Image (cartoon, grey):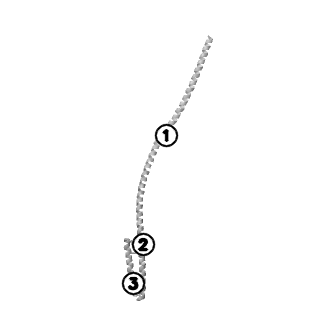
Amino acid sequence: MAQGNSKFFAITTALFVVLAIMFFTLSLTSIGKFTAQKKRVHHMEMQMLAGKSEMLKVPEIIGKLRVADKTNKELESQVADLTEESEEMTSELNELQKELTTVTIAKLVLETDKAGYTKNLIEARQTVEELRNQLSTGDGGANIDEVDEMIESPHEETTHESESSSDIPSGNVWE
C-alpha cells in the first residue's frame, strides 16, 4: 500500500503542479489584462482632463468671439459712416471745384477788362499830353486849366465804367 500511497501522492502532486501552472498562467493573464485596462483607464482619464480643460476654455472663447463680433459691428458702422462722409466730401469737392472754375473765369475776365481799361487810360493820357503840348505851344498855356478838367473827367468816367463793368462782365474787352 505504500506503493499505492506513493502513486496517489505522485498523481496528486502532479495534479497540484498542473493546477498551479494553470492558476499561475491565469493570474499572469489577469494581471496583464488588468494592467492594460489600467493603462486604458489612465489614458481615458487624461483625455477627459484634457477635454475638461478644453471645455473650461469654451466660455472664454465664446466671450472673446462676442467681443470680436461687437468690435466688428462697430468697425462696420464706422466704415459706413466714413463712406457716407467720403461721399459728402466728394460732392462738396465737386461744388468747390465748380466755384473755383467760376472764380478763375471771372478773374480772367476782370484781368482782361483791367488790361483794356489800362490801355484806354494810357491812350487817354497820351491824348491829354498831346493836347497839352498843342495848347502850350499855341496860346501860351492859357487853356491848360481846361485840359486838367478834361483829364479829371475822363478818369472819373473810366473809374465809373470799371465799377459798373465789374458788376456785369462784358463779353467784348474793347468796348
Q: Residues within 10 Å of mark 2 (few under 14, many from 20)?
A: some
Looking at the picture, which amino acid does disc 3 mark? Val
* N-term mark: 1 or 2: 1
- Give the image location of residue 40, x and y in percent: 53, 32
Which residue shows up at 42% across the image and 65% down it?
101
| Furthest-bottom residue in this view | 139
- Give the image location of residue 15, x and y in percent: 59, 18
Helix, strand or loop at disc 1?
A: helix
Looking at the picture, which amino acid does disc 2 mark? Thr
| Furthest-right residue in this view | 3
Residue under pointer 1: 54
Q: CA distance from mark 3 to mark 1?
A: 109 Å
Residue under pointer 2: 112
Q: Which image quarter: residue 110?
A: bottom left
Q: Is residue 28 above or below residue 128?
A: above
Q: CA distance from mark 3 to mark 2?
A: 29 Å
Q: Nearer the viewer, residue 124 or 144?
A: 124
Q: Nearer the viewer, residue 64 or 103?
A: 103
In the rendered structure, are the residues bearing label 1 and label 2 in contact, judged by CB atoms less than 8 Å apart? no
Which residue shows up at 57% across the image and 22% down it?
22
Give residue 147's mark.
3
* N-term mark: 3 or 1: 1
Looking at the picture, which amino acid does disc 1 mark? Glu
Q: Nearer the viewer, mark 3 or mark 1?
A: 3
Q: Is residue 17 above or below residue 170?
A: above
Q: Which image quarter: residue 114?
A: bottom left
- Give the image location of residue 150, x and y in percent: 38, 82
Q: CA distance from mark 1 to mark 2?
A: 83 Å
